[in-house]
Image (cartoon, grey):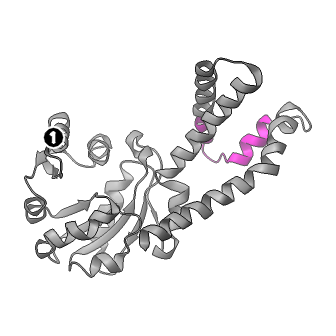
């Protein structure tokens, strides 16, 4: 997703400036054929030749991969990690490279959403400008945050929220089928189209979600307010609170 978005995102990067390695050669070769990027036979080859290394591996694989390439990650390299629960201090303990943590969103596939960014003290102003420019080209401008806030912000912006929102749309459509008999495929299509339209309304500059609620829940006491908004206001906050609690528990498990 990042490779495709960097290439599509306003020329953030061009294919011949990108090289990829992967533990699955077939996957690496497939994305190279699709996009025209270069390939590296091993992680070590990539780390040796690249000025900027974006570490995109599962959380348990971060340390093994870093151990594999750490002698090549010299202080003239910029390392960008997208692992959500590996702290800057852990990364810096494994390398003298300048380190940035970035939490992109899956919505960057469509050049939408927000990337979160945390800079280490080793990074230079040029590093920060480069990282902000690179990830700003594939979504809205990145949000630079303090590392201690990364879990809360991740729950709002990363890959989980699209799944949460999609689950809500799906459950709403399923309820329509249970309660009214609308065919499931039709209910899903209608709910999705309405959700997409609502997102477009929210893209209007200066528009907030309460603005949309006020706009469509008029007059007070009508079907929209009594039939939906008030029900959500009563029951939904507890669901959202539990989402934050559950994701916090999972982050703690990953750190442990």
Residue 158 left/right relative to 7: right
Main structural element of the magenta stretch: helix, strand or loop?
Answer: helix
**Residue on which the image places disc 1:** 26
Residue 237 place in picture, x, y as percent: 74, 55
Relative to residue 186, is residue 243 depicted above or below? below
Secondary element type, mark 1: helix
Magenta part of the protein: which range? 199-216
Residue 116 left/right relative to 127: right
On-image quarter of the N terminus: top left
Res. 10 visible in picture: yes
Res. 120 visible in picture: no
Residue 114 left/right relative to 16: right
- Corner quadrant of residue 219: top right
Give the residue drawn at x 49%, y 71%. Answer: 252
Relative to residue 200, is residue 178 depicted above or below? above
Give the residue drawn at x 88%, y 38%. Answer: 226
Give the residue drawn at x 58%, y 20%. Answer: 185
**Of residues 190 and 74, the one drawn nearer to the viewer in this rendering:** 190
Residue 217 place in picture, x, y as percent: 82, 37
Residue 59 place in picture, x, y as percent: 34, 63
**Of residues 74 and 135, the one drawn nearer to the viewer in this rendering:** 74
**Of residues 132 and 1, the one drawn nearer to the viewer in this rendering:** 1
Question: Does the magenta-highlighted stretch encompass residue 41?
Answer: no
Residue 160 left/right relative to 213: left
Residue 194 place in picture, x, y as percent: 63, 29
Relative to residue 224, is residue 150 depicted above or below? below
Toward the right, the furthest residue is: 221
On-image quarter of the C terminus: bottom left
Question: Does the magenta-highlighted stretch encompass residue 214?
Answer: yes
Give the residue drawn at x 78%, y 45%. Answer: 232
Relative to residue 249, is residue 208 depicted above or below? above
- Corner quadrant of residue 48: bottom left
């Amino acid at each position: 997703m990042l490779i495709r978005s960097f290439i599509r995102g306003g020329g953030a990067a061009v294919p011949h400036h990108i090289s990829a390695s992967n533990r699955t050669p077939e996957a690496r070769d497939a994305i190279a054929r699709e996009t025209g990027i270069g390939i590296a036979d091993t992680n070590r080859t990539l780390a040796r030749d690249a000025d900027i290394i974006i570490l995109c591996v599962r959380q348990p694989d971060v340390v093994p991969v870093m151990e594999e390439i750490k002698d090549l990650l010299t202080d003239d390299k910029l390392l960008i990690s997208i692992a959500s629960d590996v702290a800057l201090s852990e990364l810096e303990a494994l390398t003298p490279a300048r380190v940035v943590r970035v939490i992109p969103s899956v919505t960057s596939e469509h050049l939408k959403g927000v990337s979160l960014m945390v800079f280490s003290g080793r990074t230079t102003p040029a590093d920060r400008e480069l990282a902000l420019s690179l990830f700003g080209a594939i979504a809205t401008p990145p949000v630079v945050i303090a590392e201690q806030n990364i879990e809360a912000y991740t729950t709002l912006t990363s890959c989980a929220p699209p799944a949460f929102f999609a689950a809500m749309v799906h459950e709403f459509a399923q309820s329509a089928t249970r309660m009214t008999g609308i065919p499931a495929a039709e209910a899903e299509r209608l709910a999705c189209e309405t959700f997409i339209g609502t997102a477009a309304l929210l893209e209007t500059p200066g528009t907030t979600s309460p603005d949309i609620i006020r706009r469509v829940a008029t007059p007070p006491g009508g079907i929209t307010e009594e039939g939906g908004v008030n029900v959500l206001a009563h029951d939904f906050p507890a669901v959202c609170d539990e989402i934050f609690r559950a994701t916090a528990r999972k982050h703690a498990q990953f750190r442990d």
